[in-house]
Amino acid sequence: MNIFEIFQEDFLYHEYQPLHYLKEGQPIFAYEALLRNLSKVNPEQVFQTATRANILYKLDSVSIHKAVQTFANRIGHGQEHLFLNIYITTILHPNFLKIF
């Protein structure tokens, strides 16, 4: 897999896993954003490849931005929460807070 092709062709998207309250009849509490790609490559492999290519921060940042943007446009109605999986190295990166 060539990780750079995924960026160039904009193949990244997210599936949103609903998270429910345990009590029956309660509305959805939140969604977890799960990174996917049109090439159907396992997301773990995508992140491992990005790590080896030294572009994990770029991949994680793009994923965060797309997840939030898509959620706001398609799913979020102000009541649901969004959970994101973010690498600690991304959070600690000096440019992390600048992307928002």
Image: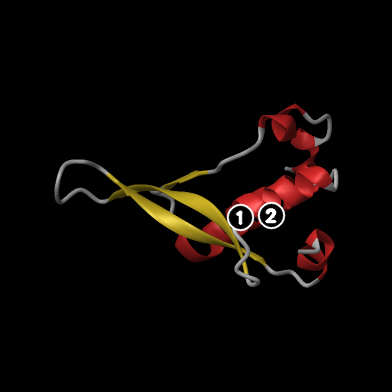
Label 2 is placed on what type of residue?
Answer: Val
Q: Quadrant of residue 94?
A: top right
Label 1 is placed on what type of residue?
Answer: Pro
Residue 24 drawn above or below residue 92: below
Which of the image's four quarters has the C terminus? top right
Look at the numbered discs 1 and 2 and tell me whether their residues touch, using CB distance below 8 Å: yes
The residue nearer to you, when weighing 27 against 11, is 11
The residue nearer to you, when weighing 99 against 59, is 59
In the image, taking residue 1 as reference, residue 14 lies left or right, namely left
Task: Kindly identify the residue that appears in the image at 79 percent across and 60 percent down.
Answer: 3
Task: Kindly identify the residue that appears in the image at 46 percent across and 61 percent down.
Answer: 75
Q: Which percent across, then down, holds residue 65?
A: 68, 52
Q: Residues within 10 Å of mark 1 (few under 14, many from 20)?
A: some
Residue 93 drawn above or below residue 75: above
Kindly report the distance in space between the C-alpha atoms of the residues bearing marks 1 and 2.
Answer: 5 Å
Q: Is residue 65 visible?
A: no
Q: Which residue is mark 1?
A: 43
Q: Residues within 10 Å of mark 2 (few under 14, many from 20)?
A: some
Q: Is residue 25 visible?
A: yes
Q: Which percent across, then down, holds residue 56?
A: 77, 44
Residue ranking furthest to the top: 92
The local secondary structure at tag 1 comes to helix
Task: Kindly identify the residue that appears in the image at 65 percent across and 57 percent down.
Answer: 66
Which of the image's four quarters has the N terminus? bottom right
Q: Quadrant of residue 9?
A: bottom right
Q: Which mark is residue 21?
A: none
The local secondary structure at tag 2 comes to helix
Task: Kindly identify the residue that appears in the image at 78 percent across and 42 percent down.
Answer: 57
Residue ranking furthest to the left: 24
Q: Which residue is mark 2?
A: 46
Q: Which percent across, then down, holds residue 50?
A: 77, 49
